[in-house]
C-alpha cells in the first residue's frame, strides 16, 4: 500500500515538474524579440499576410490563452506545427528521437563498461600505484566536459589518425532501406554487419565523448562503494571459503556496492542525455539535439517547445526508471 | 609497506601551483592583450589566409600561430578571446554563486515553505537540458556579453543551491547551531554567523569549478554562433571555424582548443585542490 | 596424539609498526575444543585471522609457522593456501547480522562453496544444506533457504552461519566470539548448539572468547593471552584447579561462578598487570621487536 502511494506521489511530482517546464519554456520563448512570422514570409509580404499567419499559429492571442490551446493539443498528442518546416512537431521530433536514444544508450554502455572496469581494477589493486593511477585518470576525465572531449577525439581519431567518421550518422553510400529510425537496433536485428560497422564508425566518437565524464564518475563512486564493502564481515567470511580476491570482489562485494552507485549514476545519465545537444552539433549527428539548435536559430517556437518537453520527459522517465530499478535490485525493499 | 597512494596524492600542492600559474598567466595576457598581441585580432587579409604556425614553412613574420581562412592572426585572437572568457568566468561565476548559494542556504536552513518552493524550482530546472536551455535563452535575450552572463546564472544557480542546501541541512542539525540559538542569536544571525562560515569552503570550491563551467558554456555558445557579435574573437568561435577547416588548417582548431582545455582543467583542478585543502574532514 | 592445527612462534605486527602477536605457540587437537581467552585487544582474534589468512591489510605475519594437518601454511603460495583453508577450515563469525551477504538468498550462501571449492554437484550441496539447517534446529529449512538475511532474526542467522561452517565437513572450525553479539537468552542456546555440532562432527574447534565462564563449559584446553603473548597453555581441568601464571589466576578469580555469581566480580589486581607488562617488555627485548 505504501509502495503504491509512493508511486502515485512520484507520478504527481513528475507531472508538476513537466508542467513547470512547459510553462517556463512557453513564457521564455514568447519573449523572443522580433516576429517569427515575419521572418517566415518572403520580403514584401503584406500586413494582412502576416496577420493571417499569426492567427493560424495563434500568436494573436494572449500568452495564457495560447498556453491553454497548446496544452489542450498536447493532451490529444498534438504538439502543433513547426514554423520552419510546416510539418507536425510530433512527427519531426519522433523521427529524430531514435538517433538520440541510440547515441545515449551506446554512450551509457561505454561509460558503464569503462567505469566499471576501472572501479574493479582499482579495488583489486587498492592502496597501490594502480589505484593511484586510476584516481588521477578519473579525476582528469571528470574535469573536462563532453564538448572538449569531443573536440579532442576529432583531432585524435578524425585528423591525426583518421579511423572514425567525424560527422553524420551513416554513410549515404550505404545500400539499405530502414523501416524504423532505430538504425543500429534494426541493423543488429537484420544482422547487416557492414551497416553495423558503419553506424558504429560514426557513433563511436560522439558516444565516447559523452561517456568519458560519466565513466569517471562511475569509476570513482563504485570504487568508493566497493572499498567500503570489502571491509564487511561477509566479504571476510567469503575469503575463508577459499575464493580468490577477484571472485570475492565480483561476487560478494559488487552486488551490494552497485546499489548506492545506481541512484547517483541515474542523475548523471540525464546529464549525459543533455550533453547530446552540443555533441550532436559537434559531430553533425542527426538527432534531436542538433534539430533543437536549428530550431532555436530558426526561431521555430512550436518545435523548440516540443523538443524541450520531450527532453524533460526523458529525464523524468530515466529518474523514475532508476528508482524502480533500485527497488527491484534491493531485496530489502522488494519484500517490504 | 607504505600506502603508495600517498605518493600519488602528494602533487596536490603542485596541482594548485600549476593550475593557479596558468590562470594567472592567462589573466595577465588578457589584461595586456592590446600591448602583447602581435596583430589586430579583427584585421583580415585574404592574401595571408591559412598561414601555418611559425615552425612550418611558408609563414609570414609576426603570425606566430598561423592565421585562419580570412587571414586573421590566431595568437592575437586567442589573447583577445581570453578577455571575454575570463570576464564571463569571473562575473557569471560570482553572480551564479551569490544567487545559488543564498537560495541554497535559505532552503537548507529555514526549511519549511521556502525550501519547498526552491526545491520545486530546482527539480524543474533539473529536467532541462542545460546546453539547450542556455542556447534558448541567448536566442531570446539576443547575443551579447550581458546575455551570456544572464543565461549562465539562470541555468546554473541550481548547482550551488543543491549542494549548499544539503550542507546547510547537515550543519543546521548539529549541536553547536542549537546552542547558538539557545544563547539568544536570531535565526538569521545564526545562519550568517554559524552556518555560512562552515559552508564557505564548499562555496569557494564550487565557485572555482563554476568559473570553468562558465568558460565552457561561453565557448559552446560561441561555437553555435550565439555568443557575442560574430566577428569578435572568441575561443568557441575559433574552434567552430577550425572544426570546419580542420583538414586544411589544423592550427585554427588546435591552439584555441589547447587554451580552452588548459583553462577549464585549471579551474577544475584549482577547485578540487581548494576543496581538499579546506575540507577539515579530508585534510 | 598429533595436533591438527599447530602454531609455532607466530608473530604478527602492524606494517612498519609494533607487534600484535608475540611468538604465539598453541595446538588444537582433532575432535577437541581449544579456547583462546584474553581481554579485548589481547590479539586472540588475530590468531584466527592469521590462520585463515584474513588479517587486516594493515597487519602482516612477521614470523613463525602455522601447521595445518602437517603442512606449514606460511610456505604455501597464496592461492594454494587459500584453497587449502577453504577446503579444510571454516569460520563461525562474531556478528551474524553482518556476516551474511544482504543481497543473496540463504541457500546459495551455504551451497556455493560446496559446489565451487569442493566440486560437489548442485543437488548434493542442496541436500546437504537442508540436512544441516535441520541439524541446527531451523524450522522449515526449505523455506529459509529462499529467504534473504534481513528476513531472519539474529539467532536464526547465527544458526545458519554455524550450519554453513559445518557444511563442508571441515577438520577445523574457528569460532570468533560467536555469541558476543547475541541476546543473553540466545547466547546459551547457540553455545550449546556449537558444542553439540562439534561433538557430533568430531571437528577440531578453536574457540575465541573473552569469557572464561564460556570456556569452562565447552573447552578441553585453552591458551590465555595478554598483549599478544600466550601466558599459559593448559588442559582445562588443571587450569581451573591450579592455574600456573598469576595473570591466569587473577582472570579466573575475576570470573563469576555459579556458586557465587556476583560476589567475585573483581578486576585483575594492578600488581599482576604490572608483572605481566614487564614480562611482555622483557619478551620484546629478548626478541628484539
Image (cartoon, helix red, strand yellow):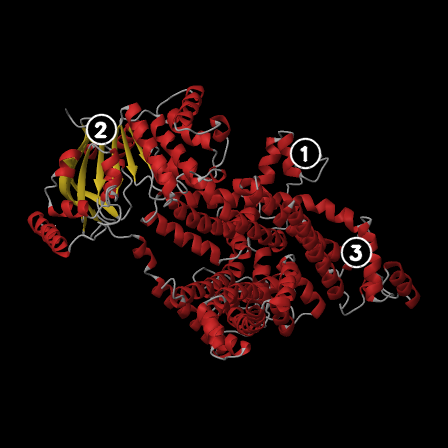
Image coordinates for residue B193, horizontal then vertical, percent: 48, 77
In the visual, does B84 lie left or right of A41? Answer: left
Question: In the figure, residue A189 lies in which quadrant?
Answer: top right
- Mark pair 1, 3: CA separation: 30 Å
Q: Nearer the viewer, mark 2 or mark 3?
A: 2
Residue B179 drawn above or below residue B275: below
Image coordinates for residue B31, horizontal then vertical, percent: 49, 78
Q: Secondary structure at mark 1?
A: loop
Q: Residue at x 51, y 28 (%)?
A: C143
Q: Give whichever of C270, A306 is nearer the camera.
A: C270
- Mark pair 1, 2: CA separation: 79 Å
- Hey, which residue is sitting farthest left in the picture? C286
In the visual, does C150 lie left or right of B17? Answer: right
Residue B36 drawn above or below residue A206: below
Residue identifier under label 3: A84
Image coordinates for residue A175, horizontal then vertical, percent: 68, 34
Image coordinates for residue C1, horizontal then vertical, percent: 14, 24
Q: Give whichever of B133, B69 is nearer the camera.
A: B133
Q: Nearer the viewer, mark 1 or mark 3?
A: 3
Q: Give the letter of the chain under mark 3.
A: A
Q: Residue at x 52, y 65 (%)?
A: B169
Residue C148 drawn above or below residue C280: above
Q: Give the letter of the chain under mark 1.
A: A
The answer, for residue B227, to whether it is visible in the render is: no
Q: Secondary structure at mark 3?
A: loop
Residue identifier under label 1: A175
Amino acid at each position: 500500500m505504501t509502495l503504491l502511494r509512493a508511486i502515485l506521489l512520484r507520478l504527481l511530482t513528475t507531472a508538476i515538474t513537466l508542467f513547470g517546464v512547459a510553462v517556463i519554456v512557453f513564457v521564455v520563448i514568447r519573449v523572443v524579440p522580433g516576429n517569427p512570422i515575419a521572418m517566415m514570409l518572403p520580403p514584401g509580404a503584406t500586413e494582412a499576410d502576416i496577420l493571417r499567419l499569426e492567427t493560424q499559429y495563434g500568436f494573436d492571442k494572449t500568452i495564457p490563452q495560447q498556453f491553454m490551446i497548446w496544452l489542450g493539443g498536447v493532451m490529444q498528442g498534438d504538439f502543433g506545427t513547426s514554423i520552419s518546416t510546416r510539418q507536425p512537431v510530433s512527427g519531426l521530433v519522433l523521427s529524430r528521437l531514435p538517433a538520440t536514444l541510440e547515441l545515449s544508450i551506446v554512450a551509457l554502455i561505454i561509460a558503464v563498461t569503462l567505469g566499471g572496469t576501472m572501479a574493479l581494477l582499482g579495488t583489486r589493486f587498492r592502496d597501490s600505484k594502480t589505484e593511484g593511477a586510476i584516481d588521477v585518470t578519473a579525476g582528469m576525465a571528470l574535469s573536462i566536459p563532453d564538448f572538449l572531449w569531443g573536440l579532442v577525439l576529432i583531432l585524435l581519431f578524425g585528423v591525426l589518425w583518421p579511423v572514425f567518421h567525424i560527422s553524420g550518422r551513416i554513410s549515404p553510400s550505404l545500400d539499405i532501406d530502414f523501416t524504423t529510425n532505430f538504425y543500429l537496433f534494426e541493423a543488429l536485428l537484420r544482422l547487416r554487419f557492414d551497416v553495423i560497422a558503419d553506424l558504429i564508425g560514426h557513433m563511436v566518437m560522439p558516444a565516447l565523448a559523452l561517456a568519458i565524464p560519466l565513466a569517471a564518475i562511475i569509476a570513482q563512486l563504485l570504487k568508493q562503494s566497493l572499498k567500503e564493502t570489502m571491509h564487511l564481515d561477509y566479504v571476510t567470511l567469503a575469503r575463508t571459503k577459499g575464493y580468490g580476491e577477484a571472485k570475492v570482489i565480483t561476487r560478494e562485494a559488487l552486488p551490494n556496492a552497485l546499489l548506492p552507485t545506481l541512484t547517483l549514476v541515474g542523475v548523471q545519465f540525464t546529464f549525459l542525455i543533455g550533453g547530446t545537444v552540443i555533441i550532436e552539433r559537434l559531430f553533425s549527428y542527426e538527432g534531436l539535439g542538433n534539430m533543437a539548435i536549428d530550431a532555436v536559430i530558426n526561431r521555430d517556437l512550436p518545435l523548440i517547445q516540443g523538443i524541450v518537453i520531450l527532453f524533460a520527459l526523458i529525464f523524468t522517465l530515466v529518474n523514475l526508471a532508476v528508482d524502480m530499478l533500485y527497488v527491484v535490485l534491493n531485496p530489502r525493499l522488494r519484500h517490504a | 609497506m607504505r600506502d603508495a597512494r600517498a605518493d600519488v596524492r602528494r602533487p596536490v600542492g603542485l596541482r594548485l601551483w600549476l593550475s593557479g600559474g596558468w590562470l594567472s598567466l592567462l589573466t595577465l595576457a588578457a589584461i595586456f592583450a592590446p600591448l602583447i598581441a602581435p596583430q589586430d585580432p579583427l584585421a583580415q587579409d585574404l592574401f595571408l589566409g591559412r598561414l601555418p604556425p611559425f615552425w612550418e614553412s611558408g609563414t609570414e613574420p609576426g603570425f606566430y600561430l598561423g592565421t585562419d581562412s580570412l587571414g586573421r592572426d590566431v595568437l592575437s585572437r586567442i589573447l583577445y578571446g581570453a578577455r571575454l572568457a575570463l570576464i564571463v568566468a569571473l562575473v557569471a561565476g560570482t553572480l551564479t554563486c551569490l544567487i545559488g548559494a543564498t537560495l541554497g542556504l535559505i532552503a537548507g536552513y529555514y526549511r519549511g515553505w521556502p525550501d519547498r518552493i526552491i526545491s520545486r524550482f530546482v527539480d524543474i530546472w533539473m529536467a532541462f537540458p542545460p546546453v539547450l536551455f542556455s542556447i534558448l535563452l541567448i536566442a531570446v535575450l539576443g547575443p551579447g556579453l550581458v546575455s551570456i552572463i544572464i543565461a549562465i546564472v539562470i541555468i546554473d544557480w541550481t548547482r550551488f543551491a543543491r549542494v549548499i542546501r544539503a550542507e546547510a541541512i547537515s550543519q543546521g542539525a548539529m549541536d553547536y547551531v542549537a546552542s547558538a540559538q539557545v544563547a539568544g542569536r536570531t535565526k538569521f544571525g545564526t545562519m550568517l554567523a554559524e552556518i555560512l562560515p562552515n559552508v564557505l569552503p564548499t562555496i569557494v570550491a564550487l565557485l572555482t569549478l563554476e568559473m570553468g563551467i562558465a568558460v565552457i558554456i561561453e565557448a559552446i555558445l560561441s561555437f553555435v554562433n550565439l555568443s557575442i557579435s560574430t566577428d569578435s574573437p572568441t575561443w568557441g568561435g575559433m574552434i567552430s571555424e577550425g572544426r570546419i577547416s580542420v583538414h586544411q588548417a589544423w592550427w585554427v582548431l588546435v591552439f584555441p582548443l589547447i587554451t580552452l582545455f588548459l583553462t577549464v582543467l585549471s579551474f577544475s583542478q584549482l577547485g578540487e585542490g581548494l576543496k581538499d585543502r579546506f575540507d577539515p574532514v579530508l585534510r | 596424539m598429533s595436533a591438527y592445527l599447530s602454531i609455532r612462534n607466530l608473530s604478527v605486527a602492524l606494517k612498519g609498526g609494533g607487534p600484535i602477536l608475540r611468538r604465539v605457540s598453541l595446538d588444537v587437537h582433532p575432535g577437541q575444543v581449544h579456547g583462546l581467552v584474553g581481554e579485548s585487544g589481547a590479539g586472540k582474534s588475530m590468531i584466527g585471522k592469521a590462520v585463515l589468512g584474513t588479517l587486516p591489510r594493515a597487519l602482516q605475519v612477521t614470523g613463525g609457522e602455522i601447521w595445518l594437518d602437517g603442512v606449514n601454511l606460511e610456505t604455501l603460495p597464496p592461492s594454494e593456501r587459500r584453497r587449502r583453508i577453504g577446503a579444510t577450515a571454516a569460520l563461525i563469525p562474531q556478528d551474524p547480522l553482518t556476516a551474511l551477504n544482504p543481497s543473496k538468498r540463504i541457500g546459495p550462501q551455504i551451497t556455493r562453496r560446496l559446489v565451487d571449492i569442493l566440486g560437489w554437484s548442485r543437488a548434493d550441496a542442496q541436500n546437504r544444506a537442508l540436512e544441516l539447517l535441520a541439524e541446527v534446529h531451523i524450522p522449515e529449512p526449505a523455506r529459509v533457504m529462499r529467504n534473504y538475511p534481513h528476513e531472519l532474526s539474529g539467532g536464526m542467522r547465527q544458526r545458519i552461519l554455524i550450519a554453513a561452517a559445518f557444511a563442508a565437513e571441515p577438520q577445523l572450525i574457528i569460532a570468533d566470539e560467536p555469541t558476543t553479539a547475541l541476546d543473553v537468552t540466545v547466547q546459551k542456546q547457540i553455545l550449546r548448539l556449537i558444542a553439540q555440532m562439534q561433538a557430533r562432527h568430531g571437528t577440531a574447534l578453536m574457540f575465541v572468547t573473552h569469557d572464561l565462564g564460556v570456556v569452562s563449559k565447552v573447552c578441553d584446553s585453552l591458551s590465555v593471552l595478554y598483549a599478544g603473548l600466550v601466558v599459559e597453555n593448559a588442559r582445562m581441568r588443571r587450569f581451573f584447579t591450579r592455574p600456573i601464571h598469576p595473570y591466569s589466576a587473577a582472570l579466573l578469580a575475576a570470573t563469576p561462578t555459579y556458586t557465587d555469581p556476583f560476589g567475585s566480580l573483581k578486576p585483575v589486581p594492578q600488581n599482576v598487570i604490572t608483572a605481566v607488562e614487564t614480562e611482555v617488555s622483557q619478551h620484546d627485548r629478548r626478541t628484539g621487536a
